Image (cartoon, rainbow, N blue to C red):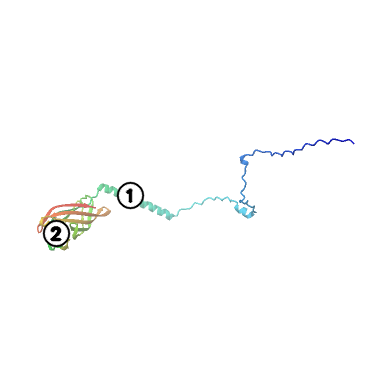
Amino acid sequence: MLFHPPPPPSRPVSPPPPPQKQTIPVSLDQIVSKPDKNQQTPTSEKTDPDIENSRKVRKPILREPHPRRTNPLIWCCAILCLFFSLILILFGIATLIIFLTIKPRIPAFDTPNASLNGIYFDSPEYFNGDFTFLANFSNPNRRIDVRFEYLVIELYFHDRLISTQAVQPFSQRRGEARVEAVHFVLSLVYLPQNLGVELQKQILSNRVNYNIRGTFKVGANLGLIHFSYQMHCRCELVISSPPTGVLVSHSCKTKR
């Protein structure tokens, strides 16, 4: 029997290499972000044909506007407003021209003379007196007439009112002057003790200081134009002692 040698050992078979995936280049525009897990995809709903028809945009139908006629009453009101506006403008221009041409001035007030007839003290705080002064009113305008409609004159001693006198209204033509005698009768007029002592000192020094304040309402006529204003005057008088007190000096200021 023949002896056969054993067959040579077979080589181990290596497993085939795994197939390699082929990479394909992709652009950035093709990269799509993954949807969020929490985000739910909207479910497709069935649309109703009536709803689709209502969603269609209808083109507006353009129609030619009908011309509207303006109410005749509105035209009349507009014409009247324009007419009155023109009248007011013309009147204002005419008034301005007249004022610039004529240059109206306020009347003047002065005290050319005064007399102190007596001062008597019943007590250190009460006294009686008699005082008269001449008020000179003059109209310096050459083309305007004035009228003093309200006249009140007050007598003061050291800024304390001691008497008041009213004057009757009167009129003045252009360039005219008028003198009015204003008489003050003082009876038991109260003065603080310091002012009473001061008045007695002035009597002894033969220099009594009185102040006059006047408030006037003046009306002016310029043709068909009438206007009025208030005028104030202040005068400081120095008078000699009674009973023959006369005006020694004075100064007056007039303003509107």
Q: Secondary structure at mark 1?
A: helix
User: Between residues 170 and 117, which one lies in front from this camera angle?
Assistant: 117
Q: Is residue 194 left or right of residue 24?
A: left
Q: Give the amino acid type for the residue marked by disc 2 in the picture.
A: Val
Extreme residue in the right direction: 1
Marks 2/1: CA distance?
Answer: 63 Å
User: Between residues 119 and 26, which one lies in front from this camera angle?
Assistant: 26
Q: Residues within 10 Å of mark 1 (few under 14, many from 20)?
A: few
Q: Residues within 10 Å of mark 2 (few under 14, many from 20)?
A: few
Asked whether the viewer can see residue 183, the reply is: no
Q: Secondary structure at mark 2?
A: helix
Give me the residue at 15% from left, 54% from top.
237
User: Between residues 45 and 10, which one lies in front from this camera angle?
Assistant: 10
Q: Is residue 13 left or right of residue 75?
A: right
Tell me where residue 221 appears, x and y as whole percent: 25, 53
Q: Give the amino acid type for the residue marked by disc 1 in the picture.
A: Leu
Image quadrant in which you'd find residue 117: bottom left
Tell me where residue 130 appears, x and y as whole percent: 13, 60
Checking the image for residue 90, the label placed there is 1
Q: Is residue 242 left or right of residue 43?
A: left
Tell me where residue 250 appears, x and y as whole percent: 15, 52
Q: Which residue, given by chain and number where applicable, does mark 2 sit on?
A: 197
Extreme residue in the left direction: 244
